[in-house]
Image (tube, rainbow, N blue to C red):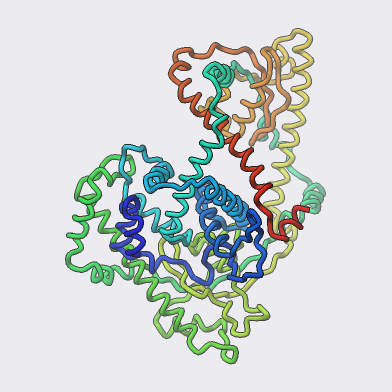
Amino acid sequence: MIGTIRRHQTWLWGVIIVATIFSFVYYLSPSTRYSGGGQGYRDNSSLNLGSINGEPITPEQLRAAEKEASLFFRLRSGAWPASEDQKKQVRRIAEQSLVIESILKDYKITATTDAAARFTKQMFGIPPGQSMPAEKLSEWVQTELMAKGNMTLDDFDRFARHQAAQEYLVSLVGMSGKLITSKEAEFFYRRENEPIVTEIASFPTTRYYAATAPTEAELQDFFTKHEAEYRLPDRVQINYVVFDPSNYMAKADQLLGTNADEKVDEYYHQQGAETFKDASGQPLSAADAQARIKKQMRMIAAFGEAKKDARAFVNALSEGRDSTHPYSPSDLEKLAKARGLTVKTTAPFDEKTGCKDLDLPAKGLHVLFSLREDAPDDTEKSMLYAPSPLAGETAVYVAGLNKRIPSQLQTLAAARDLVAGDYREAKAISLAGEAGNKFAGALQAGLMQGKSFDEVCAAEGVKPESLPPFALTTTNLPAGLDKASFQQLQEAVFSLPNGQSSKYIVTTDGGLVAYVKGRLPVDETRMKQEIPSYLARMRQQREYAAFSEWLSRQLQLRFVPPPEEQESAG
Protein backbone atom coordinates (compact mmCIF):
# COMPACT_ATOMS: atom_id res chain seq x y z
CA MET A 1 0.00 0.00 0.00
CA ILE A 2 2.75 2.47 0.94
CA GLY A 3 4.59 1.58 -2.28
CA THR A 4 1.46 2.39 -4.24
CA ILE A 5 1.17 5.74 -2.49
CA ARG A 6 4.74 6.64 -3.38
CA ARG A 7 4.25 5.73 -7.02
CA HIS A 8 1.10 7.84 -7.36
CA GLN A 9 1.71 10.53 -4.75
CA THR A 10 1.90 13.37 -7.30
CA TRP A 11 -1.79 13.09 -8.09
CA LEU A 12 -3.45 10.42 -5.95
CA TRP A 13 -2.24 11.51 -2.51
CA GLY A 14 -5.38 13.48 -1.80
CA VAL A 15 -7.46 10.44 -2.73
CA ILE A 16 -5.65 7.84 -0.67
CA ILE A 17 -4.43 9.66 2.43
CA VAL A 18 -7.49 8.52 4.34
CA ALA A 19 -6.79 4.98 3.21
CA THR A 20 -3.40 5.07 4.91
CA ILE A 21 -4.94 6.34 8.12
CA PHE A 22 -7.81 3.87 8.24
CA SER A 23 -6.13 0.85 6.56
CA PHE A 24 -9.43 -0.09 4.99
CA VAL A 25 -7.93 -2.10 2.14
CA TYR A 26 -7.56 -5.18 4.31
CA TYR A 27 -11.00 -5.44 5.81
CA LEU A 28 -13.11 -4.14 2.92
CA SER A 29 -11.63 -6.39 0.21
CA PRO A 30 -14.23 -8.86 -1.12
CA SER A 31 -13.72 -12.59 -0.93
CA THR A 32 -10.86 -13.89 -3.05
CA ARG A 33 -12.95 -16.88 -3.94
CA TYR A 34 -15.59 -14.75 -5.61
CA SER A 35 -13.42 -11.84 -6.68
CA GLY A 36 -10.50 -11.12 -8.90
CA GLY A 37 -10.29 -9.47 -12.27
CA GLY A 38 -12.14 -10.66 -15.30
CA GLN A 39 -14.08 -13.87 -15.56
CA GLY A 40 -11.77 -16.11 -13.55
CA TYR A 41 -9.31 -16.96 -16.34
CA ARG A 42 -6.47 -19.18 -15.25
CA ASP A 43 -2.92 -18.70 -16.46
CA ASN A 44 -3.25 -21.39 -19.09
CA SER A 45 -1.11 -20.84 -22.16
CA SER A 46 -3.39 -23.12 -24.21
CA LEU A 47 -6.47 -20.98 -23.55
CA ASN A 48 -7.50 -19.13 -26.74
CA LEU A 49 -8.67 -15.64 -25.76
CA GLY A 50 -8.25 -14.18 -29.23
CA SER A 51 -5.39 -12.19 -30.67
CA ILE A 52 -4.39 -8.64 -31.58
CA ASN A 53 -2.09 -8.05 -34.54
CA GLY A 54 -1.37 -11.78 -34.55
CA GLU A 55 -0.23 -11.80 -30.91
CA PRO A 56 -2.35 -13.98 -28.56
CA ILE A 57 -4.14 -12.22 -25.72
CA THR A 58 -2.90 -13.55 -22.37
CA PRO A 59 -5.14 -14.17 -19.34
CA GLU A 60 -3.20 -11.50 -17.45
CA GLN A 61 -3.85 -8.91 -20.18
CA LEU A 62 -7.55 -9.75 -20.32
CA ARG A 63 -7.95 -9.65 -16.53
CA ALA A 64 -6.38 -6.18 -16.36
CA ALA A 65 -8.48 -4.95 -19.29
CA GLU A 66 -11.69 -6.31 -17.75
CA LYS A 67 -10.97 -4.50 -14.50
CA GLU A 68 -10.66 -1.26 -16.43
CA ALA A 69 -13.78 -2.13 -18.44
CA SER A 70 -15.72 -2.79 -15.22
CA LEU A 71 -14.79 0.66 -13.93
CA PHE A 72 -15.75 2.19 -17.28
CA PHE A 73 -19.12 0.37 -17.04
CA ARG A 74 -19.59 1.70 -13.49
CA LEU A 75 -18.88 5.29 -14.51
CA ARG A 76 -21.20 5.05 -17.50
CA SER A 77 -24.15 3.19 -15.95
CA GLY A 78 -23.85 4.04 -12.24
CA ALA A 79 -23.59 0.38 -11.17
CA TRP A 80 -20.97 -2.33 -11.27
CA PRO A 81 -21.61 -5.14 -13.76
CA ALA A 82 -23.53 -8.02 -12.17
CA SER A 83 -25.68 -9.85 -14.69
CA GLU A 84 -24.34 -12.19 -17.35
CA ASP A 85 -25.36 -9.73 -20.06
CA GLN A 86 -23.48 -6.93 -18.32
CA LYS A 87 -20.40 -9.12 -17.97
CA LYS A 88 -20.54 -9.80 -21.70
CA GLN A 89 -20.63 -6.04 -22.26
CA VAL A 90 -17.56 -5.70 -20.05
CA ARG A 91 -15.80 -8.39 -22.10
CA ARG A 92 -16.50 -6.47 -25.33
CA ILE A 93 -15.25 -3.22 -23.79
CA ALA A 94 -12.12 -4.99 -22.54
CA GLU A 95 -11.34 -6.41 -25.96
CA GLN A 96 -11.80 -2.98 -27.53
CA SER A 97 -9.52 -1.49 -24.85
CA LEU A 98 -6.79 -3.99 -25.69
CA VAL A 99 -7.00 -2.98 -29.34
CA ILE A 100 -6.79 0.70 -28.37
CA GLU A 101 -3.81 -0.08 -26.16
CA SER A 102 -2.05 -1.68 -29.12
CA ILE A 103 -2.79 1.42 -31.21
CA LEU A 104 -1.41 3.69 -28.50
CA LYS A 105 1.80 1.66 -28.51
CA ASP A 106 2.06 1.87 -32.30
CA TYR A 107 1.49 5.64 -32.20
CA LYS A 108 3.86 5.95 -29.20
CA ILE A 109 1.18 7.78 -27.18
CA THR A 110 1.61 7.71 -23.39
CA ALA A 111 -0.23 9.73 -20.78
CA THR A 112 1.72 11.92 -18.39
CA THR A 113 0.96 12.14 -14.68
CA ASP A 114 -0.64 15.55 -15.27
CA ALA A 115 -2.87 14.11 -17.98
CA ALA A 116 -4.01 11.30 -15.65
CA ALA A 117 -4.73 13.87 -12.94
CA ARG A 118 -6.76 16.00 -15.38
CA PHE A 119 -8.79 12.98 -16.43
CA THR A 120 -9.48 12.09 -12.78
CA LYS A 121 -10.76 15.60 -12.14
CA GLN A 122 -12.97 15.39 -15.23
CA MET A 123 -14.29 12.05 -14.02
CA PHE A 124 -15.56 13.68 -10.82
CA GLY A 125 -16.66 16.91 -12.48
CA ILE A 126 -14.01 19.02 -10.76
CA PRO A 127 -13.06 22.26 -12.58
CA PRO A 128 -9.39 22.40 -13.65
CA GLY A 129 -8.53 25.21 -11.24
CA GLN A 130 -9.92 23.46 -8.16
CA SER A 131 -8.22 20.91 -5.95
CA MET A 132 -9.62 17.43 -5.44
CA PRO A 133 -12.08 17.14 -2.51
CA ALA A 134 -10.15 14.43 -0.71
CA GLU A 135 -13.02 13.48 1.60
CA LYS A 136 -15.32 12.72 -1.33
CA LEU A 137 -12.68 10.90 -3.34
CA SER A 138 -11.39 8.81 -0.47
CA GLU A 139 -14.95 7.71 0.30
CA TRP A 140 -15.39 6.72 -3.35
CA VAL A 141 -12.12 4.79 -3.33
CA GLN A 142 -13.20 2.97 -0.17
CA THR A 143 -16.84 2.18 -0.92
CA GLU A 144 -16.76 1.84 -4.70
CA LEU A 145 -13.33 1.20 -6.17
CA MET A 146 -12.06 -1.23 -3.55
CA ALA A 147 -15.07 -2.65 -1.71
CA LYS A 148 -17.42 -3.07 -4.69
CA GLY A 149 -15.12 -3.03 -7.68
CA ASN A 150 -12.34 -5.10 -6.08
CA MET A 151 -9.81 -2.79 -7.73
CA THR A 152 -6.53 -1.47 -6.40
CA LEU A 153 -5.06 1.98 -6.79
CA ASP A 154 -2.67 0.51 -9.35
CA ASP A 155 -5.72 -0.57 -11.37
CA PHE A 156 -7.18 2.91 -11.13
CA ASP A 157 -3.88 4.55 -12.07
CA ARG A 158 -3.65 2.35 -15.16
CA PHE A 159 -7.27 3.11 -16.06
CA ALA A 160 -6.77 6.88 -15.71
CA ARG A 161 -3.60 6.86 -17.80
CA HIS A 162 -5.19 4.76 -20.54
CA GLN A 163 -8.27 6.98 -20.66
CA ALA A 164 -6.15 10.14 -20.78
CA ALA A 165 -4.07 8.68 -23.62
CA GLN A 166 -7.24 7.65 -25.44
CA GLU A 167 -8.55 11.22 -25.24
CA TYR A 168 -5.44 12.34 -27.10
CA LEU A 169 -5.96 9.58 -29.68
CA VAL A 170 -9.57 10.69 -30.19
CA SER A 171 -8.39 14.27 -30.80
CA LEU A 172 -5.77 13.06 -33.28
CA VAL A 173 -7.95 10.67 -35.28
CA GLY A 174 -11.19 12.64 -35.02
CA MET A 175 -9.66 15.92 -36.14
CA SER A 176 -11.88 16.04 -39.23
CA GLY A 177 -14.93 16.26 -36.98
CA LYS A 178 -13.81 19.69 -35.80
CA LEU A 179 -14.14 21.23 -39.26
CA ILE A 180 -17.82 22.15 -38.81
CA THR A 181 -18.32 25.91 -39.36
CA SER A 182 -20.13 28.47 -37.23
CA LYS A 183 -22.77 28.90 -39.96
CA GLU A 184 -23.52 25.17 -39.94
CA ALA A 185 -23.75 25.21 -36.15
CA GLU A 186 -26.18 28.16 -36.29
CA PHE A 187 -28.43 26.26 -38.71
CA PHE A 188 -28.63 23.24 -36.39
CA TYR A 189 -29.04 25.46 -33.32
CA ARG A 190 -32.06 27.21 -34.85
CA ARG A 191 -33.64 23.92 -35.88
CA GLU A 192 -33.26 22.40 -32.40
CA ASN A 193 -34.24 25.50 -30.41
CA GLU A 194 -37.16 26.83 -32.44
CA PRO A 195 -40.21 26.88 -30.07
CA ILE A 196 -43.16 24.85 -31.35
CA VAL A 197 -46.71 25.90 -30.40
CA THR A 198 -48.54 22.63 -29.80
CA GLU A 199 -51.99 21.48 -28.78
CA ILE A 200 -52.81 17.93 -27.74
CA ALA A 201 -55.75 15.63 -27.15
CA SER A 202 -55.00 13.17 -24.34
CA PHE A 203 -56.34 9.65 -23.87
CA PRO A 204 -55.21 8.54 -20.40
CA THR A 205 -55.83 4.96 -19.31
CA THR A 206 -57.57 6.19 -16.16
CA ARG A 207 -60.43 7.42 -18.34
CA TYR A 208 -61.17 3.84 -19.41
CA TYR A 209 -60.35 1.93 -16.28
CA ALA A 210 -63.98 1.74 -15.11
CA ALA A 211 -64.86 -0.28 -18.21
CA THR A 212 -62.17 -2.93 -17.65
CA ALA A 213 -63.64 -5.15 -14.91
CA PRO A 214 -63.11 -8.72 -16.22
CA THR A 215 -65.50 -11.64 -16.13
CA GLU A 216 -64.17 -14.89 -14.74
CA ALA A 217 -63.83 -16.28 -18.26
CA GLU A 218 -61.86 -13.22 -19.44
CA LEU A 219 -59.55 -13.41 -16.43
CA GLN A 220 -58.92 -17.11 -16.97
CA ASP A 221 -58.24 -16.56 -20.66
CA PHE A 222 -55.80 -13.73 -19.91
CA PHE A 223 -53.98 -15.84 -17.32
CA THR A 224 -53.73 -18.81 -19.68
CA LYS A 225 -52.15 -16.66 -22.39
CA HIS A 226 -49.67 -15.04 -19.98
CA GLU A 227 -49.12 -17.89 -17.54
CA ALA A 228 -45.32 -17.88 -18.04
CA GLU A 229 -45.16 -14.25 -16.90
CA TYR A 230 -46.47 -15.25 -13.46
CA ARG A 231 -43.96 -18.01 -12.97
CA LEU A 232 -42.00 -17.60 -9.74
CA PRO A 233 -38.23 -17.45 -10.45
CA ASP A 234 -35.59 -19.54 -8.70
CA ARG A 235 -35.32 -18.39 -5.12
CA VAL A 236 -33.12 -19.05 -2.12
CA GLN A 237 -33.56 -18.80 1.60
CA ILE A 238 -30.43 -17.92 3.58
CA ASN A 239 -29.34 -18.42 7.19
CA TYR A 240 -27.00 -15.70 8.42
CA VAL A 241 -25.21 -14.19 11.40
CA VAL A 242 -24.84 -10.40 11.62
CA PHE A 243 -21.64 -8.71 12.76
CA ASP A 244 -22.81 -5.16 13.40
CA PRO A 245 -20.04 -2.49 13.44
CA SER A 246 -21.97 -0.52 16.06
CA ASN A 247 -21.07 -3.28 18.55
CA TYR A 248 -17.36 -2.60 18.00
CA MET A 249 -17.18 1.11 18.73
CA ALA A 250 -15.33 0.66 22.02
CA LYS A 251 -12.71 -1.45 20.27
CA ALA A 252 -12.50 1.13 17.49
CA ASP A 253 -11.77 3.84 20.05
CA GLN A 254 -8.95 1.72 21.47
CA LEU A 255 -7.45 1.27 18.02
CA LEU A 256 -7.63 4.98 17.24
CA GLY A 257 -5.85 5.71 20.51
CA THR A 258 -5.88 8.66 22.83
CA ASN A 259 -4.61 11.03 20.15
CA ALA A 260 -7.56 10.47 17.81
CA ASP A 261 -8.61 14.12 18.14
CA GLU A 262 -5.12 15.19 17.08
CA LYS A 263 -5.34 12.96 13.98
CA VAL A 264 -8.73 14.42 13.17
CA ASP A 265 -7.50 18.00 13.59
CA GLU A 266 -4.41 17.28 11.48
CA TYR A 267 -6.48 15.76 8.69
CA TYR A 268 -9.01 18.62 8.81
CA HIS A 269 -6.35 21.29 8.37
CA GLN A 270 -4.49 19.23 5.80
CA GLN A 271 -7.56 19.02 3.56
CA GLY A 272 -8.81 22.55 4.18
CA ALA A 273 -12.06 23.82 5.63
CA GLU A 274 -13.64 24.21 2.16
CA THR A 275 -13.45 20.44 1.63
CA PHE A 276 -16.14 19.64 4.19
CA LYS A 277 -19.66 20.70 3.28
CA ASP A 278 -23.22 19.94 4.36
CA ALA A 279 -25.99 18.52 2.17
CA SER A 280 -26.75 21.97 0.70
CA GLY A 281 -23.12 22.54 -0.26
CA GLN A 282 -22.35 25.00 2.51
CA PRO A 283 -19.03 24.69 4.40
CA LEU A 284 -19.30 22.98 7.78
CA SER A 285 -18.02 24.63 10.90
CA ALA A 286 -14.67 23.31 12.14
CA ALA A 287 -16.40 21.48 15.00
CA ASP A 288 -18.98 19.83 12.74
CA ALA A 289 -16.39 18.85 10.15
CA GLN A 290 -14.11 17.33 12.76
CA ALA A 291 -17.06 15.47 14.29
CA ARG A 292 -17.84 14.01 10.86
CA ILE A 293 -14.23 12.97 10.31
CA LYS A 294 -14.05 11.31 13.70
CA LYS A 295 -17.35 9.51 13.12
CA GLN A 296 -16.02 8.13 9.83
CA MET A 297 -12.77 7.08 11.45
CA ARG A 298 -14.61 5.24 14.21
CA MET A 299 -17.03 3.55 11.81
CA ILE A 300 -14.29 2.38 9.46
CA ALA A 301 -12.25 1.00 12.34
CA ALA A 302 -15.34 -0.68 13.82
CA PHE A 303 -16.22 -2.12 10.42
CA GLY A 304 -12.77 -3.63 10.26
CA GLU A 305 -13.15 -5.24 13.68
CA ALA A 306 -16.55 -6.63 12.71
CA LYS A 307 -15.07 -8.20 9.60
CA LYS A 308 -12.14 -9.57 11.62
CA ASP A 309 -14.55 -11.39 13.97
CA ALA A 310 -16.65 -12.56 11.04
CA ARG A 311 -13.56 -13.97 9.35
CA ALA A 312 -12.59 -15.78 12.55
CA PHE A 313 -16.12 -17.21 12.68
CA VAL A 314 -15.80 -18.49 9.09
CA ASN A 315 -12.42 -20.03 9.92
CA ALA A 316 -13.90 -21.83 12.92
CA LEU A 317 -16.77 -23.02 10.76
CA SER A 318 -14.30 -24.62 8.34
CA GLU A 319 -12.11 -26.34 10.93
CA GLY A 320 -11.81 -30.07 10.36
CA ARG A 321 -13.93 -30.04 7.21
CA ASP A 322 -12.95 -32.38 4.41
CA SER A 323 -14.54 -35.03 2.22
CA THR A 324 -14.84 -37.36 5.20
CA HIS A 325 -16.23 -34.67 7.48
CA PRO A 326 -18.29 -32.43 5.18
CA TYR A 327 -20.18 -29.29 6.10
CA SER A 328 -23.79 -29.66 7.16
CA PRO A 329 -26.68 -27.14 7.19
CA SER A 330 -26.74 -27.19 11.01
CA ASP A 331 -23.09 -26.07 11.42
CA LEU A 332 -23.93 -22.38 11.45
CA GLU A 333 -26.55 -22.76 14.18
CA LYS A 334 -24.25 -24.90 16.37
CA LEU A 335 -21.28 -22.52 16.17
CA ALA A 336 -23.40 -19.41 16.63
CA LYS A 337 -25.05 -20.89 19.72
CA ALA A 338 -21.65 -21.80 21.18
CA ARG A 339 -20.51 -18.19 20.71
CA GLY A 340 -23.69 -16.55 21.96
CA LEU A 341 -24.73 -15.32 18.54
CA THR A 342 -28.12 -15.43 16.84
CA VAL A 343 -28.83 -17.04 13.49
CA LYS A 344 -31.48 -15.33 11.37
CA THR A 345 -33.23 -16.59 8.23
CA THR A 346 -34.26 -14.49 5.27
CA ALA A 347 -37.56 -14.70 3.49
CA PRO A 348 -37.27 -16.46 0.10
CA PHE A 349 -35.93 -14.07 -2.55
CA ASP A 350 -34.73 -14.10 -6.15
CA GLU A 351 -31.49 -12.60 -7.39
CA LYS A 352 -33.12 -9.91 -9.52
CA THR A 353 -35.44 -8.54 -6.83
CA GLY A 354 -32.87 -8.89 -4.05
CA CYS A 355 -33.18 -9.48 -0.35
CA LYS A 356 -34.85 -7.05 2.04
CA ASP A 357 -33.09 -8.61 5.05
CA LEU A 358 -29.50 -8.14 3.79
CA ASP A 359 -28.08 -4.85 2.52
CA LEU A 360 -25.72 -6.56 0.09
CA PRO A 361 -24.61 -5.29 -3.33
CA ALA A 362 -25.26 -7.31 -6.47
CA LYS A 363 -21.94 -9.13 -6.13
CA GLY A 364 -22.88 -10.37 -2.64
CA LEU A 365 -26.30 -11.53 -3.83
CA HIS A 366 -24.60 -13.45 -6.62
CA VAL A 367 -22.48 -15.25 -4.02
CA LEU A 368 -25.62 -16.27 -2.13
CA PHE A 369 -27.24 -17.58 -5.29
CA SER A 370 -24.18 -19.70 -6.01
CA LEU A 371 -24.65 -21.63 -2.74
CA ARG A 372 -25.88 -25.21 -3.05
CA GLU A 373 -25.52 -28.60 -1.42
CA ASP A 374 -25.91 -30.77 -4.50
CA ALA A 375 -22.81 -29.81 -6.50
CA PRO A 376 -21.44 -33.19 -7.68
CA ASP A 377 -17.76 -32.23 -7.32
CA ASP A 378 -18.19 -30.60 -3.91
CA THR A 379 -17.56 -33.60 -1.67
CA GLU A 380 -16.85 -31.32 1.31
CA LYS A 381 -20.24 -29.58 0.86
CA SER A 382 -18.31 -26.31 1.17
CA MET A 383 -20.76 -24.57 -1.16
CA LEU A 384 -23.34 -24.63 1.60
CA TYR A 385 -21.62 -21.52 2.99
CA ALA A 386 -20.21 -18.28 1.63
CA PRO A 387 -16.44 -18.83 1.88
CA SER A 388 -15.76 -15.46 3.49
CA PRO A 389 -17.72 -12.68 5.20
CA LEU A 390 -19.99 -10.60 2.98
CA ALA A 391 -19.71 -6.86 3.51
CA GLY A 392 -22.85 -4.76 3.15
CA GLU A 393 -23.33 -1.02 3.58
CA THR A 394 -24.06 -1.25 7.31
CA ALA A 395 -22.96 -4.69 8.50
CA VAL A 396 -20.92 -7.81 7.80
CA TYR A 397 -22.58 -11.21 7.35
CA VAL A 398 -21.63 -14.85 7.57
CA ALA A 399 -24.15 -16.68 5.42
CA GLY A 400 -25.17 -20.24 4.59
CA LEU A 401 -27.84 -21.88 2.51
CA ASN A 402 -31.13 -22.76 4.15
CA LYS A 403 -32.78 -24.06 0.98
CA ARG A 404 -33.14 -23.46 -2.73
CA ILE A 405 -36.63 -23.09 -4.15
CA PRO A 406 -36.86 -24.00 -7.85
CA SER A 407 -38.84 -21.90 -10.28
CA GLN A 408 -42.50 -22.85 -10.33
CA LEU A 409 -45.76 -21.88 -11.98
CA GLN A 410 -48.46 -20.18 -9.95
CA THR A 411 -52.16 -20.94 -10.08
CA LEU A 412 -54.66 -18.26 -10.97
CA ALA A 413 -55.96 -18.38 -7.42
CA ALA A 414 -52.50 -17.61 -6.00
CA ALA A 415 -51.84 -14.74 -8.44
CA ARG A 416 -55.44 -13.49 -8.86
CA ASP A 417 -54.90 -9.91 -7.62
CA LEU A 418 -51.82 -9.43 -9.75
CA VAL A 419 -53.47 -11.00 -12.82
CA ALA A 420 -56.62 -8.90 -12.39
CA GLY A 421 -54.55 -5.71 -12.13
CA ASP A 422 -52.54 -6.60 -15.22
CA TYR A 423 -55.70 -7.47 -17.18
CA ARG A 424 -57.38 -4.18 -16.34
CA GLU A 425 -54.23 -2.22 -17.17
CA ALA A 426 -53.86 -3.99 -20.53
CA LYS A 427 -57.55 -3.49 -21.29
CA ALA A 428 -57.40 0.22 -20.42
CA ILE A 429 -54.35 0.66 -22.67
CA SER A 430 -56.20 -1.09 -25.47
CA LEU A 431 -59.32 1.06 -25.07
CA ALA A 432 -57.25 4.25 -24.90
CA GLY A 433 -55.42 3.21 -28.07
CA GLU A 434 -58.66 2.50 -29.91
CA ALA A 435 -60.08 5.89 -28.96
CA GLY A 436 -56.81 7.70 -29.74
CA ASN A 437 -56.35 6.11 -33.16
CA LYS A 438 -59.98 6.83 -34.06
CA PHE A 439 -59.52 10.49 -33.12
CA ALA A 440 -56.19 10.75 -34.99
CA GLY A 441 -57.90 9.54 -38.19
CA ALA A 442 -60.83 11.94 -37.73
CA LEU A 443 -58.46 14.85 -37.06
CA GLN A 444 -56.40 14.30 -40.21
CA ALA A 445 -59.57 14.01 -42.28
CA GLY A 446 -61.02 17.15 -40.69
CA LEU A 447 -57.84 19.19 -41.29
CA MET A 448 -57.88 18.17 -44.95
CA GLN A 449 -61.46 19.49 -45.14
CA GLY A 450 -60.33 22.85 -43.75
CA LYS A 451 -61.63 22.34 -40.22
CA SER A 452 -59.67 23.64 -37.21
CA PHE A 453 -58.21 21.49 -34.45
CA ASP A 454 -60.76 22.87 -31.97
CA GLU A 455 -63.66 22.13 -34.33
CA VAL A 456 -62.63 18.49 -34.75
CA CYS A 457 -62.15 18.12 -30.98
CA ALA A 458 -65.65 19.49 -30.36
CA ALA A 459 -67.18 17.16 -32.96
CA GLU A 460 -65.39 14.13 -31.45
CA GLY A 461 -66.16 15.09 -27.84
CA VAL A 462 -62.49 15.48 -26.95
CA LYS A 463 -61.12 18.28 -24.76
CA PRO A 464 -58.06 20.00 -26.33
CA GLU A 465 -55.10 21.15 -24.25
CA SER A 466 -52.62 23.91 -25.07
CA LEU A 467 -49.01 23.28 -24.04
CA PRO A 468 -46.39 25.95 -23.36
CA PRO A 469 -44.19 26.38 -26.48
CA PHE A 470 -41.28 23.95 -26.45
CA ALA A 471 -38.30 23.06 -28.60
CA LEU A 472 -36.43 19.85 -29.23
CA THR A 473 -33.96 20.89 -26.53
CA THR A 474 -36.57 21.83 -23.91
CA THR A 475 -36.20 19.90 -20.64
CA ASN A 476 -38.94 21.52 -18.54
CA LEU A 477 -41.82 19.04 -18.51
CA PRO A 478 -45.35 20.26 -19.26
CA ALA A 479 -47.95 19.43 -16.63
CA GLY A 480 -49.26 15.89 -16.92
CA LEU A 481 -46.34 14.46 -18.93
CA ASP A 482 -43.37 12.53 -17.63
CA LYS A 483 -39.92 12.66 -19.20
CA ALA A 484 -40.33 9.63 -21.48
CA SER A 485 -43.74 10.78 -22.77
CA PHE A 486 -42.53 14.33 -23.38
CA GLN A 487 -39.51 13.08 -25.34
CA GLN A 488 -41.83 11.04 -27.57
CA LEU A 489 -43.98 14.12 -28.11
CA GLN A 490 -40.94 16.27 -28.98
CA GLU A 491 -39.72 13.74 -31.54
CA ALA A 492 -43.20 13.39 -33.06
CA VAL A 493 -43.88 17.10 -33.60
CA PHE A 494 -40.30 18.07 -34.55
CA SER A 495 -40.76 16.97 -38.17
CA LEU A 496 -44.41 18.00 -38.54
CA PRO A 497 -45.27 21.08 -40.67
CA ASN A 498 -47.40 23.82 -39.16
CA GLY A 499 -51.10 22.98 -39.26
CA GLN A 500 -50.54 19.21 -39.28
CA SER A 501 -51.29 16.55 -36.67
CA SER A 502 -49.47 13.47 -35.46
CA LYS A 503 -50.47 9.85 -35.34
CA TYR A 504 -51.54 8.42 -31.98
CA ILE A 505 -48.50 8.63 -29.65
CA VAL A 506 -48.32 5.96 -26.95
CA THR A 507 -47.25 7.38 -23.57
CA THR A 508 -46.60 5.84 -20.17
CA ASP A 509 -50.19 6.41 -19.03
CA GLY A 510 -52.13 6.04 -22.27
CA GLY A 511 -51.52 8.20 -25.30
CA LEU A 512 -52.12 11.49 -27.07
CA VAL A 513 -52.51 13.12 -30.49
CA ALA A 514 -50.57 16.34 -31.14
CA TYR A 515 -51.34 19.28 -33.44
CA VAL A 516 -48.67 21.81 -34.49
CA LYS A 517 -50.27 25.22 -34.40
CA GLY A 518 -47.14 27.15 -35.37
CA ARG A 519 -43.52 28.02 -34.58
CA LEU A 520 -41.96 31.00 -32.82
CA PRO A 521 -38.69 32.79 -33.66
CA VAL A 522 -35.50 31.68 -31.91
CA ASP A 523 -34.28 34.01 -29.14
CA GLU A 524 -31.43 35.79 -30.98
CA THR A 525 -29.79 37.14 -27.82
CA ARG A 526 -29.71 33.73 -26.21
CA MET A 527 -28.41 32.15 -29.42
CA LYS A 528 -25.45 34.54 -29.54
CA GLN A 529 -24.61 33.64 -25.97
CA GLU A 530 -24.94 29.88 -26.45
CA ILE A 531 -23.60 29.33 -29.97
CA PRO A 532 -19.91 29.12 -28.91
CA SER A 533 -20.56 26.24 -26.47
CA TYR A 534 -23.01 24.66 -28.92
CA LEU A 535 -20.37 24.75 -31.66
CA ALA A 536 -17.84 23.17 -29.28
CA ARG A 537 -20.28 20.34 -28.45
CA MET A 538 -21.04 19.72 -32.12
CA ARG A 539 -17.35 19.53 -32.95
CA GLN A 540 -16.79 17.12 -30.07
CA GLN A 541 -19.69 14.93 -31.20
CA ARG A 542 -18.38 14.89 -34.77
CA GLU A 543 -14.89 14.19 -33.44
CA TYR A 544 -16.08 11.13 -31.51
CA ALA A 545 -18.19 9.97 -34.45
CA ALA A 546 -15.13 10.11 -36.73
CA PHE A 547 -13.05 8.30 -34.12
CA SER A 548 -15.71 5.59 -33.65
CA GLU A 549 -15.84 4.93 -37.37
CA TRP A 550 -12.04 4.70 -37.53
CA LEU A 551 -11.87 2.47 -34.45
CA SER A 552 -14.45 0.12 -35.94
CA ARG A 553 -12.15 -0.43 -38.90
CA GLN A 554 -9.17 -0.94 -36.61
CA LEU A 555 -11.05 -3.60 -34.65
CA GLN A 556 -11.73 -5.49 -37.86
CA LEU A 557 -8.10 -5.24 -38.94
CA ARG A 558 -6.36 -5.94 -35.63
CA PHE A 559 -8.62 -8.14 -33.49
CA VAL A 560 -9.36 -11.83 -33.95
CA PRO A 561 -11.95 -12.96 -31.36
CA PRO A 562 -11.71 -16.28 -29.51
CA PRO A 563 -13.36 -19.32 -31.16
CA GLU A 564 -16.55 -19.22 -29.07
CA GLU A 565 -17.22 -15.61 -30.10
CA GLN A 566 -16.61 -16.44 -33.74
CA GLU A 567 -19.13 -19.30 -33.47
CA SER A 568 -21.79 -17.12 -31.80
CA ALA A 569 -21.26 -14.40 -34.40
CA GLY A 570 -21.62 -16.94 -37.20
Percent across and percent down for residue 401 are: 57, 74
In terms of image quadrants, where is residue 339? bottom left
Q: Is residue 97 above or below residue 548?
A: below
- Relative horizontal placement of residue 175, taking residue 254 as reference (left or right): right
- In the foreground, 274 or 219: 274
Task: Report the residue at 53% width, 87% height from top.
Answer: 321
Percent across and percent down for residue 543 are: 55, 33
Report if residue 320 is visible in the image: yes
- In the foreground, 233 or 256: 256
Q: Is residue 500 above or below residue 25?
A: above
Task: Report the residue at 64% width, 35% height from top.
Answer: 509
In terms of image quadrants, where is residue 342? bottom left
Percent across and percent down for residue 525 are: 44, 13
- In the foreground, 423 or 193: 193
Q: Is residue 345 above or below residue 443?
A: below
Count how many numbered circles sit on residues in the image: 0
Residue furthest top as drawn: 450
- Relative horizontal placement of residue 531, taking residue 304 as reference (left or right): right
Report if residue 467 is visible in the image: no
Task: Report the residue at 35% width, 38% height from top.
Answer: 128
Percent across and percent down for residue 194 are: 56, 17
Task: Report the residue at 49% width, 14% height from top.
Answer: 523
Q: Is residue 478 above or below residue 280?
A: above
In terms of image quadrants, where is residue 380? bottom right
Quadrant including the N terminus? bottom left
